[in-house]
Image (spheres, helix red, strand yellow):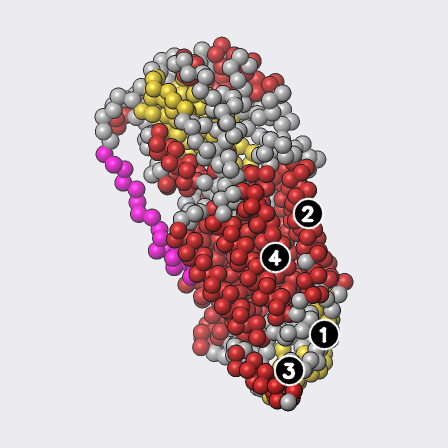
Amino acid sequence: MHYMYSMHSFKTARSITPENPERLYFIIIVINTLFGLQLLNSFFSLLVNFLRERPTVSLVQVAIYAVVTFLLVFFGGFLFKKLPKRMLFIVLVAAISIVRYIVQICRWAPLSLAASALGTIIWILSLVFFISIAQQRKIKLFFSFFPAVLYGFAINTSLNGLLGTWDMVWRPEPLIVIILLGIIILKIRLALRLSYDLEYEKNYSDGSRAVFYSLLIVMPFVFLQLYQFQNIAALSAKTSFDTNTAVAIITASNIAALAFAYLISIKKSRILITAVTSVVAVLSFWPDITGGPYILQVIAGNIASWWLLLIVLNRSVSYSKEKIPWKNNTAFGISGILLFIFAFMYYGSYDLSLPIKSWMIPISISFILAIFAIFSASLRSVVRFKVFEKKGAYSGSERRTDKGNYSGQGNGSGQGSYSRQGSYYGQNTSSGQGRYSGAWSLRNALFGPGAEKYALIFLMIFLFIVPSVIDLPAAYSPATAIQRDSVRVMHYNIHQGFNIDGYQDLESIARVIEKNGADIVSLNEVSRGWVVNGSADLYEWLANRLDMKYKLFTPASDLVWGNAILSRYPLKLASSGFLPRMDAPLRRSYLLAEVDLSSIGLKNIDTLTTHLHHIAAESVKRQAQVKALTDILKGRQRTVIFGDFNAQTGAPEITMMEDAGLIDTQLALGKQDELTWIYYKPYERIDYIWATPDIDFSNLFVTYSRASDHLPISVDIK
């Protein structure tokens, strides 16, 4: 009776198990990677823009919160001990989907931060799970796990581009919520079907000591991708290309990286290719590169970094044994901590006086990745794998061949059999028919045996390059100007696009500017690709959203964070540059431009925007910066000066501006009591609009909003 029940269960499982499970694994890993990147985006951004902004929370406490999050990955290893493979797979897939949905619909920052932290932990544990079953040969590293992860990054980049770099995790639109829900339902349905391909046993696989070391670099590699190779905003900022062009360039680099990875099958050249790509990867982070050379850095560096990761992962699935995956789990836990440390050191260097420069961080990560990859490629490729012999599951024996391949014979509960041969990076055949070989050609790729492998490249081209071309914007045709007697100028510190509740809310910022009817807008704290600020391009997004086609940006701390001017009237750059730093962690700058108002019958004006040193007790540094500004402004007429001066009326630096003959418009109109820095409630007046004496101004007002931690100032000028 028991035998008949077992046979019935086996036949039922066979009828439910998909015929080609690797395709389903591919889709699930793609979606899983997409969700993981979005949750990591939310986690880092809320850490910095919500938790760090609380008045009672220190930078040390933020660091503790993050480290504890990644430490919990270690305890996640107990799930592998307690749950059988099929159940754990469903739990991980469902949990990350549910958490992702909570983060999308929840608008209470403490819960969103906790949920995104939990989601980050689950994502890392899912990577441990997939690496474990890759070590068991349940899925192939290539063409399943590795291309799926690359696709996940590529889709995340494409979605960000289609949304103007404002990540969907921050957007509350009903359509996005519905699309997300549809993806989640699809993912869970596929996972339930695919679960029958997994044993209801705790027969996991774990790596050896060498595997442990190789996996340490995986999460820092994620930082490299988000920091540069998948960073649309940074590419736009450093090349002056629009968002669509930047998306097309990064997509092309992803396609090239996937195509280049096919060289993994050429064993004899693997060490040489790895050595060359190691040099390219390190040089791709050489600092202060812009224009065409930066595009070359992105494309070549992206190809090189994905190759190095593939070599490392190839090593990680080479040695394994039947065991709870504590080494895999521990390696990923440490890898997550390293990710945070590197990100903390990079962005913390703009807030703290650290002994290293920010540009050293990505170079150091790429150098470590290169060392790990060279070490992995230089070792002999030997497969050591203890085969499972479970009733109703695959069993058999494997042996190492002279070419480093493996073959095996097995059966499940006496029903059917299969044979397999191919190297451990994923070439295989069934029914002992041999494997595809022969020189690569376009005809073979499209129509020959194994064409489905190369179809991944053509699919990426179709999904990303074609929509990028279709979405190219039409040429701008400005509307006919109408005679006016004044224009409205506005200054706004937009706090990297994050509101005082800790959410990136670009739409609210745009609506505040629209509500004020501003024609010319000065912006401070304009982030163009900082990972801890959601990697959004605030400059391009706001210019497009507000239909302000004339715009200028100047960097401050680095090339992707600084000050900007948006205008409905033509702008001409007069000058820009950096202000005295005096050992301050954060570099400051100014931007001076001429605005052509002839189309509306007004005389042209000059506008200067700046943002001074922020530490209240260090007035001396602000005084040096004001001295530099007044020297630049000496003798200029019809000039408006905007800025977050981080000083109140009566401070020495403010007195220096008055002594230079500049007029504090807010004070002159008797509205100095309208405070500009809210910090939860109006707190201080530290934002100013100054004017030279030859400018008439009126109608100044400060608009209350929670879209930023500063309030905007608007005034009409003639």
Q: Nearer the viewer, residue 287 or 130?
A: 130
- Tell me the residue at 67%/77% (across/down): 405
Tags 1 and 2 touching, CB below 8 Å:
no
Question: In whole angstroms, how far apart are the C-alphas of marks 3 and 2?
Answer: 41 Å
Q: Residue at x 65, y 34 (%)?
A: 58
Label 1 environment density (alpha carbons within 10 Å; few <14, some 14–19, many ≥20): many
Please state, as top left, top right, bottom left or bottom right, where the N terminus lies in the image. bottom right
**Residue designated by label 4:** 122
Picture disc at residue 68: 2
Residue 426 sits above or below residue 544 on the image? below
The answer to whether any part of residue 498 appears in the image is: yes
Q: Name which residue type carries label 4.
A: Ile
Picture mark count: 4
Q: Is residue 664 visible?
A: no
Q: Which disc, if any, is residue 385?
A: 1
Residue at the farthest front position = 1
Dot 2 falls on a residue whose secondary structure is helix
